[in-house]
Amino acid sequence: MSCLQEYTVVEYLRSKKTLAERIAALDDIISNAILLLAETTSGAGANISSYELNDSQVQIKTGYRSIEDVTVSISALERTRNLYLNQLKGRSIVLQDKRTFK
């Protein structure tokens, strides 16, 4: 009997309690998706049909139809990660006079 649970990406993120945990989870998902894309472009995984992330506690499965689907998914995950990061740390801009630089 396996204790491994299957989640969608959204369910997996909801299972994380803090913003920092969600950011770390998104980092793992994005990293694995980029590796999947690299395998596909190098010919090792010529046909993408699904993506799995298994961290020995949770298994995430997502189906794709093409390389473009993977790149769109990575972009969406990165935007989501940036939203969480902005909520956690906020945004700031430093304006400096041009005379400050020499």
Image: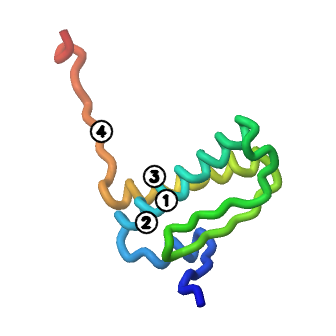
Q: Which residue bears the numbered disc 4? A: 93
Q: Nearer the viewer, mark 4 or mark 2?
A: 2
Distance in Å between CA atoms under marks 2 and 3: 11 Å
- Which of discs 3 and 1 lies nearer the camera? The answer is 1
Residue under numbered circle 3: 82
Q: In the rendering, which numbered label is found on residue 26?
A: 1
Q: Name the residue under label 2.
A: 22
First along the sequence among labels 4 and 2: 2
Callout 4 crowding tier (Cα within 10 Å): few <14, some 14–19, many ≥20 = few
Label 3, label 4: how far apart the Cα atoms are: 16 Å
Amino acid type, residue under disc 2 in the picture: Arg
* Residue 67 left/right relative to 92: right
Q: Compare marks 3 and 4 and give the one earlier in the sequence.
A: 3
Label 1 crowding class (10 Å Cα cut-off): few <14, some 14-19, many 20+? many
Q: What residue type is labelled 1?
A: Leu
Residue contact between numbered discs 2 and 1, judged by CB atoms under 8 Å = yes
- At a point 70% along the width and 65% down the height, the residue shown is 62
Identify which residue, 82 or 39, lies in the foreground. Answer: 39
